[in-house]
Image (tube, helix red, strand yellow):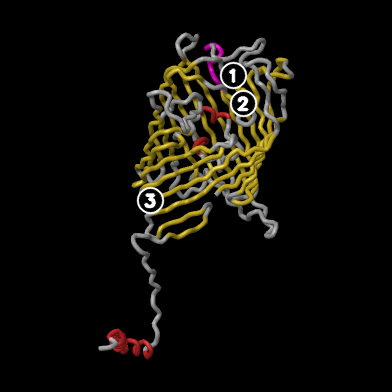
């Protein structure tokens, strides 16, 4: 044939003619939508936004969330003394009143094949550097037992392990100086009895030079490891009683060995004033922490408390062989606008702040008392003595705060804090040794997180 292609096309058309005629003569039927399969092994991804940008594969094997946070603060010190200290043992002066960026972070949370997950969070510091905050992976194959390893917070202290996005004040309390913080390690986690009991237990580097471990982005300083464990019980979590459902208690402990590390002074978080001034001596020996925590939420009200104790052995040759630190805080909050106060989560205003819609968000009052004390430090010879002053061993804190939740993701916090020292502390005033019995600050924080 001269035109084999034309003949082939004509044959195909004739073969399909009855089907075409049937499609024309029969009434059209609604057909289900058929999703085209992507080429290769690709799986479609869906995107959504709910307190962060989230994505998920249609087969459920891959999920992810991209988030971040920014805290912009302002600090003013009401009790001020001059800078330029007269001696190394004297407080060298307070920083000026200033705006500052307290936190700027980016976060990725991912889940792979339902059971494996990863978190990577980076933070810009005030110095302009960028560092890893969290970096860990884990397995969550069953609720009763899971594993997590990498750089993360050690499971000690409810105040420390609660995200800074959801703490009730612009900063954590004095008691937080005895906590663990970020460190490198591995831990087992799980929940039993329908989430009534939760546990975390693990091994961490623990080789930090401060009471609150600074093991983030550093190698270990010795061969010893810190053993950390915590148990939390929410006895009425599954009950019908709204009054008791959010009652939670817990205990935690750490144990490790320090090898000739220096101990940093204890200072206030926002002003840097030395609360307890240690001399040039070394830790050497066992370090043990014990913590007891309490949390209760009901409607717009919350009450939280914690007691922490840390005992540290000292290097041979000092009058005492150890020092003991104790700290506690008790705090209460109340939402004036009536919203329910969630446990360690964001408040959701009944009406978000909006000039157009007339909403004002949620308003919350917060009150906190805290103290930290080191026992036997003076007799142990580890405190700096500046005549005629007696070395200070204790500091108390009272903080009154107001939280304005404009939306669930935007909050303005304004705190008034007074620190009171157990003994008059030496400070420098125009190069002359003076005394300081207390310090008052006003701290504000505007935060946005997603």
Dot 1: element: loop
Q: Could you give the CA–CA distance between mark 1 and mark 3, rounded to whole angstroms?
A: 49 Å
Task: Give the residue furthest to the front.
Answer: 2
The numbered disc on residue 449 is: none
Dot 3: element: strand
Residue at image point 66% right, 41% down: 402
Q: Nearer the viewer, residue 49 or 339?
A: 49
Magenta segment includes 378? yes
Q: Which residue is mark 3?
A: 112
Task: Give the residue furthest to the left.
Answer: 1
Which x, y percent locates residue 152?
45, 37
Determine whether 189 is above or below 349 in the image: above
Q: Which residue is mark 1?
A: 277
Residue at image point 58% right, 37% down: 128
Q: Which residue is mark 2?
A: 396
The image quadrant that residue 185 belongs to is top left
Which x, y percent locates residue 93?
68, 23
Q: Nearer the viewer, residue 199 or 128?
A: 128
Residue at image point 58% right, 26% down: 371
Which x, y percent locates residue 278?
56, 17
Earlier sequence position, callout 2 versus callout 1: 1
Q: Nearer the viewer, residue 294 or 175?
A: 175
Dot 2: element: strand
Start-end of magenta stretch:
373-380
């Amino acid at each position: 044939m001269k035109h084999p292609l034309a003949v082939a096309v004509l044959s195909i058309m004739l073969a399909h003619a009855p089907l075409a005629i049937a499609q024309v003569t029969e009434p059209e039927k609604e057909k289900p939508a058929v999703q085209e399969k992507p080429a290769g092994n690709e799986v479609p991804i869906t995107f959504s936004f709910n307190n962060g940008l989230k994505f998920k594969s249609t087969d459920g094997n891959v999920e992810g969330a991209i988030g971040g946070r920014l805290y912009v603060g302002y600090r003013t010190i009401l009790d001020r003394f001059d800078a330029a200290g007269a001696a190394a043992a004297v407080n060298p002066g307070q920083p000026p009143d200033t705006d500052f960026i307290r936190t700027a972070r980016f976060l990725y949370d991912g889940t792979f094949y339902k059971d494996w997950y990863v978190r990577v969070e980076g933070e810009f510091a005030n110095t302009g550097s960028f560092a890893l905050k969290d970096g860990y992976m884990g397995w969550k194959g069953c609720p009763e037992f899971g594993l997590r390893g990498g750089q993360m917070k050690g499971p000690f202290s409810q105040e420390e392990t609660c995200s800074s996005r959801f703490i009730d004040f612009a900063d954590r309390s004095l008691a937080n100086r005895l906590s663990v913080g970020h460190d490198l390690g591995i831990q087992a986690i799980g929940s039993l009895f329908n989430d009534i009991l939760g546990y975390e237990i693990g091994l961490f580097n623990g080789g930090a030079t401060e009471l609150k471990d600074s093991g983030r982005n550093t190698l270990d300083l010795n061969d010893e490891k810190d053993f950390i464990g915590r148990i939390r019980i929410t006895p009425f979590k599954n009950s019908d009683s709204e009054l008791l459902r959010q009652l939670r208690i817990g205990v935690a402990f750490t144990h490790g060995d320090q090898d000739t590390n220096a101990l940093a002074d204890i200072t206030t978080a926002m002003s840097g004033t030395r609360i307890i001034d240690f001399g040039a001596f070394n830790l050497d020996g066992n370090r043990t922490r014990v913590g007891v925590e309490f949390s209760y939420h009901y409607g717009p009200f919350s009450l939280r408390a914690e007691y922490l104790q840390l005992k540290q052995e000292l290097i041979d040759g000092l009058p005492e062989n150890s020092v003991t630190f104790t700290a506690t805080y008790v705090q209460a909050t109340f939402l004036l606008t009536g919203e329910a106060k969630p446990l360690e989560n964001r408040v959701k205003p009944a009406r978000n702040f909006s000039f157009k819609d007339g909403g004002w968000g949620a308003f919350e009052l917060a009150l906190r008392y805290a103290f930290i004390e080191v026992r036997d430090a003076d007799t142990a010879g580890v405190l700096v003595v500046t005549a005629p002053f007696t070395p200070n061993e204790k500091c108390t804190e009272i903080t009154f705060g107001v939280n304005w939740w404009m939306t669930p993701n935007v909050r303005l916090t304004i705190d008034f804090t007074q620190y009171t020292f157990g003994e008059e502390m030496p400070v420098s005033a125009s190069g002359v040794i003076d005394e300081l019995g207390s310090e008052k600050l006003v701290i504000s924080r505007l935060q946005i997180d997603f």
